[in-house]
Image (cartoon, grey):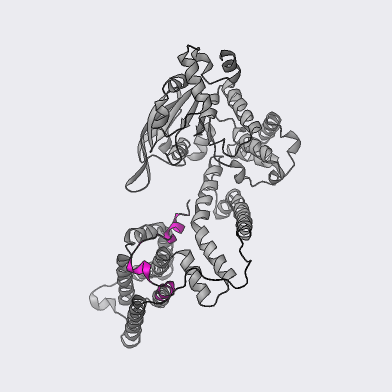
Amino acid sequence: MSLAFLRAYRFSRRDTPIHRLDPRTKLLMSVAFTLLGITTLDPVEISVLLLLQLVVLWLSRSFSVWLRSLKALAFFFALILLAQVLTTGNLLQSAYFALRFAVVASATSWFFFTTSPEDMGRALEQVGVSADVALSFTLSMRFIPVIAEEFQSVFDAQRSRGLDVSKGGLRDRMSSLLPVLIPLFVGVIRRTYEIADALELRGYGALKDRTRWKVLRFKKADLIALLASVALSGCIVYYRLTMAPLDLSKLGIVL
Amino acid sequence: MAHIEAVDVHFRYEPGREVINGVSLMVPEGSSMSMMGPNGSGKTTLIKMFNGLLLPTRGKILVDGVDTTTTTVPQLAKKVGVIFQSPEMNFFSETVREEIAFGPKNMGFAEDKVKETVDDISERFGLKEYLSANPFDLSGGEKRRLSIASVLAWGPEVIVVDEPTIGLDYQYRTFLIDLTQDLRARGKSVVIVTHDVDFALQTSERAVLINDGSVVWQGGLADLLRSPELFDRANLVQTFLSSLCHDLLEAGAPESIFMPVKLESLLGEV
């Protein structure tokens, strides 16, 4: 058992056109991909969305990280596929359902591994979210991989004391995780107190009007990316409104 | 016979980057060994393979002759007890009694045997009066003792301790040195993972130096002390104690007092 899939969302600092984009631009692009992805089951749309994201991944030099993130999510793909096959009995439709999950998961993952938690916090602040909430968000994002590692450490330590989570039914397995979850939560709570103390000791909250060290500004590249996203989203919506869904039987695929 | 034998072990967390690179070593019965090397050299990864938490990507690890790939972590944990860094961070029970009993119960001990074990080990570790207390309410030193007691409770033959000296006071350090001697007297094997040269000298008779996932040297402690250049090969720092031991060996002091170093004998020699 592992929380390795959380590493899929870890930011990696690189100098690429996508990394340089304003986080608000990336957020809008990611939301557009996500919304278009979750509202379709059309094979053409899913394929186009996936292709577009491959372009983004290529531009951000994150292709291998993305592949690893998909591998980490393999369990969820299998679960979705199985649930769909069992409920619909249609293998191809189930496969598209799983592929749609890949589109949505990718839209979030490339955003997270090209945008630093600090930039996300700055973006939130600049759209009017309070500094405290933005900081909380930044810290939460930053600690996801740390907590994943801590989970692994506690899990390893308890397994070394004979803990076996592979025995029994689902309920037994869930309750056998308590020796892992309790120390994990205790550690997280302890850490939040330590961070709060460290922030206060370094003067956080001393000034009512905070100044900003780095101010986000839209650049020409942002404008191009936004216009391209709007145009492509418009094309997909137009296609959705005017074209009939792809009939696979006409292509000779009969299920 | 060796309790643990690593044969040309390789390991990588992700493709293309070997963290352990062809390690071969043995932990003989009743021995005490220090595994030394700088941070990030692969020591913790290696000991995670001793009880099957990680499996070699190439080569093999044998625990009492059994390949770790052919058995389970709980089975291996019966023989190899691992005490990780900051083990007090892993408490979860409401009482000290339950915390100690967790391991023996998992190992399949009968109810009365669990009770007997808890009584015995709590007595040995000075925790008897706290059996009904909450582990989180104990002092720092008591928590450390409890964390060790809760691993030794089911009687593993090999005890692996990962970086035990981090953040230690003198009292607890002395306790650990006495404990390793006691464990050896009981016929157990002890593996100590550390970059604290002084602690290694006082607890072990053999040393394995690891750097960049490879064994750069292994042998008896006296041989290590005779060759200070070995410290550089494992990025370790010579200490006053190791320099003193080196000088004494050069001056013809008997090897027996360096296997491991006994401060009383050393003072006599000085």
Q: Is residue A128 magenta?
A: no
Q: Is residue B244 above or below residue A171?
A: above
Span colored in magenta: A1-29
Q: Quadrant of residue B110?
A: top right
Q: Residue at x 61, y 17 (%)?
A: B264
Q: Is residue A4 magenta?
A: yes
Q: Quadrant of residue B171?
A: top right
Q: Nearer the viewer, residue A153 or A81?
A: A153
Q: Nearer the viewer, residue B39 or B80?
A: B39
Q: Is residue A166 visible?
A: no
Q: Quadrant of residue B132?
A: top right
Percent coordinates x, y for residue B73 in the rendering: 49, 40
Percent coordinates x, y for residue B68 in the rendering: 43, 36
Total labels drawn: 0
Q: Is B199 placed left or right of B59 in the picture?
A: right
Percent coordinates x, y for residue A35 in the rendering: 42, 77
Q: Is B47 placed left or right of A179 in the picture?
A: left
Percent coordinates x, y for residue B265 in the rendering: 58, 15
Q: Is residue A189 above or below residue A153?
A: below
